[in-house]
Image: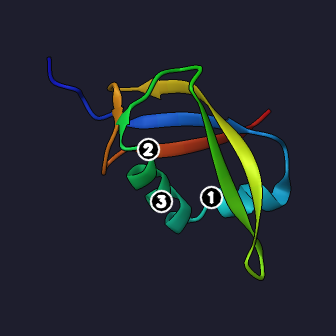
Amino acid sequence: MTDIIADRVTLSYPEDERSRNELETDTYRSYLRRARDGPVSPGDEWKEFVSRGCGAVRDVVLRVEAVDGGTTVGDTTEFEFVSR
């Protein structure tokens, strides 16, 4: 069976404006496509980090809330972020 690349993956994150600003960048979305390339399912939790500036990072857990159009993260997968 061939894996189908998901059109969109909805990820929730702990409410934090600074984290959201980092998550919304094209650079971070591109990073997630490379780092999470492969199978994805609702309920998965990804332990990641976001920049806090000046070389500092903040740990953040992203939870997969929904997967639309496929079963894997790939080069064309879009990410939607919602706070929880």
Q: Which residue is mark 1?
A: 24
**Location of residue 8 by image quarter:** top left
Residue at point 84%, 43% (across, down): 15
At mark 2, the secondary structure is loop
Residue 31 is labelled as 3
Q: Residues within 10 Å of mark 3 (few under 14, many from 20)?
A: few
In depth, the one of 69 and 5 nearer the eye is: 5
Q: Residue furthest top?
A: 1
Q: Which residue is mark 2?
A: 36
Q: Residues within 10 Å of mark 2 (few under 14, many from 20)?
A: few
Q: Residue furthest right?
A: 16
Looking at the picture, does residue 44 appear above or below residue 36? above
Q: Nearer the viewer, mark 3 or mark 1?
A: 3
At mark 3, the secondary structure is helix
Query: Gap in Å between the C-alphas at discs 1 and 2?
Result: 16 Å
**Location of residue 61 by image quarter:** top right
Q: What's the amino acid at mark 1?
A: Glu
